[in-house]
Image (tube, helix red, strand yellow):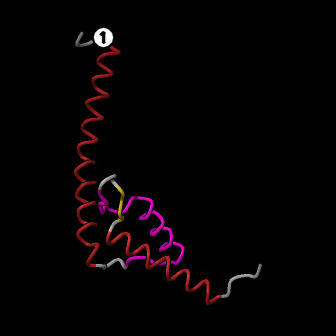
Amino acid sequence: MTTATENELGEMHGEVARQLTKIIRDGVEVDKGEAVVTVTAPAAYFAVAVTMLKNNNVTAAKDNEALKGLRDELAARRAKAKGKLNARVLEDVGAELDRQLGFGN
């Protein structure tokens, strides 16, 4: 058996990238008995794509406009959850302390 050439590996890399892109963009066909339906690509395909991007040092620029909305939404969710989480934890701790001290029975 001979080793693959750099050109062959490059072709394979390109084909994997093209097929992953197609599947993530278009979904996959699933046989549902009497019909074949197209569904969103399973999470495993996204995981492979993310791994491939990371392994090739592909990252989004910090000023990427396509990701700005996502970044802002995630920051808002974190801020909202942070406030709720703290209040809930304090209530739970207070209730547990009251229970242990015998108050409110």
The residue to which callout 1 is attached is: 102
Residue found at the very far right of the displayed protein: 1
Q: Is residue 57 left or right of residue 25?
A: right
Q: In which quarter of the image is residue 40?
A: bottom left
Residue visible at 31% across and 16% down?
Answer: 99
Q: Is residue 105 left or right of residue 50?
A: left
Over which residues does the magenta segment extend?
35-60
Question: Horizontal and vertical percent for residue 38?
Answer: 30, 63
Residue visible at 50% across and 72% down?
Answer: 52
Number of marks in the rendered image: 1
Q: How crowded is mark 1: few (under 14 residues within 10 Å), some or many (20 or more)?
A: few
In the image, residue 96 sits, relative to residue 13, either above or below, namely above
Residue visible at 26% across and 13% down?
Answer: 103
Q: What residue type is labelled 1?
A: Gly
Closer-to-camera residue (99/48): 48
As helix, strand or loop, the secondary structure at mark 1 comes to loop
Question: Horizontal and vertical percent for residue 100?
Answer: 35, 15
In the image, residue 96 sits, relative to residue 21, either above or below, namely above
The reply to whether the magenta stretch includes residue 37 is: yes
The reply to whether the magenta stretch includes residue 16 is: no
Q: Quadrant of residue 46?
A: bottom left
